Amino acid sequence: AGKRDLTRPLVALAEAVLEVSMTVIRHAMRFAPIAVFGLIAQTTATTGMGVLVDLAIYSIAVLAGLVILLALYLALAAAFGRISPFAFARAAAPVQLLAFSTSSSAAVMPLTMKTAVDRLAVAPALAGAVVPLAATINMAGTALYQAGAIVFLANQSGVLLSPVDLALIMVTLVGASVGAPAAPGASFAVLAATAANVGVPAEGLALIFGVDRLLDMARTAVNVTGDLVACRILAVSGDKAPVNA
């Protein structure tokens, strides 16, 4: 009881800081759509309507890249996980839908583990070890999105990227995506830092922020698909899952 009395002021302080932080975040989120609209309107007025067409092309290119990555995951599941792409897609669909709606790999982690165990015949101990680790380090969809965003921002700002710059960007983003928080919008900080390192003006980030939510939802769905594929392949490699489960 004495120790609890000693820690009570510290706990109360932490709760107060949390409440203040959440209040600030709630107010910021209320004004975020208006702020994004204003930034895009300012950019459009300065550069013309053509920037909206470029933004649409950028979004389509990123989504196309994510679709290709998703197809690659299905191929890996078929080749090394010994499960048909259709069977895997049916099993993963609920997880992908929840990931798409929450934009957070961490939020869907319990469902990811349950799906791996119940529908992909993965041992519970293996799923419990792989899914949390994969949710942290398996961010291929995020790295793909960030690379596309850097190239788009460089083109918009007139910055020429050499092949060496592109290779460095890809290596940096793949490394930076490992350990990135599995929360909505968390990759934006990594994107801003990488853009500054290659000489891309950070002001351009406001332009892509307006479409980031949709792309965030899509890349999170691809990321959790990769987590499930990793679980299935590891389970099969240890002979712990039947063929075409």
Image: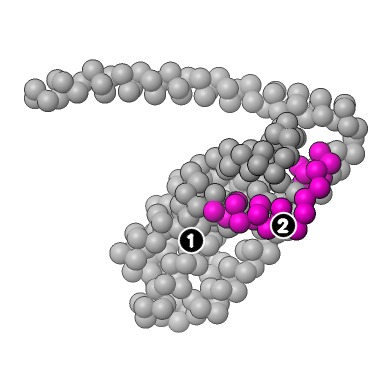
Which residue is situated farthest in the left direction here? 1
Q: Dot 1 lies on which element? A: helix
Q: Position of residue 94 (x, y in %)?
A: 51, 57
Residue 86 visible within the image: no
Determine the residue positioned at 54% across, 40% down.
Answer: 186
181 vs 173, left or right, is: left
Q: Disc 2 residue type? A: Val
Q: Report how far apart the C-alphas of labels 1 and 2 lie in the structure.
A: 31 Å
Label disc, if present, on residue 219 of the rendered structure: none
Q: Dot 2 lies on which element? A: helix
178 vs 198, left or right, is: left
**For residue 41, above or below residue 197:** above
Q: Position of residue 145 (x, y in %)?
A: 66, 51
Disc 2: which residue? 164
97 vs 206, left or right, is: left
Magenta span main SS: helix
Q: Position of residue 202 (x, y in %)?
A: 70, 34
Task: Please provide the residue range marked out in magenta.
Answer: 152-175
Observer-nearest of 34 and 193: 193
Disc 1: which residue? 227
State which tag comes first along the sequence, 1 or 2.
Answer: 2
Residue 116 visible within the image: yes
Whether the residues at callouts 1 and 2 have beta carbons within 8 Å, the answer is no
Quadrant holding the C terminus: bottom left
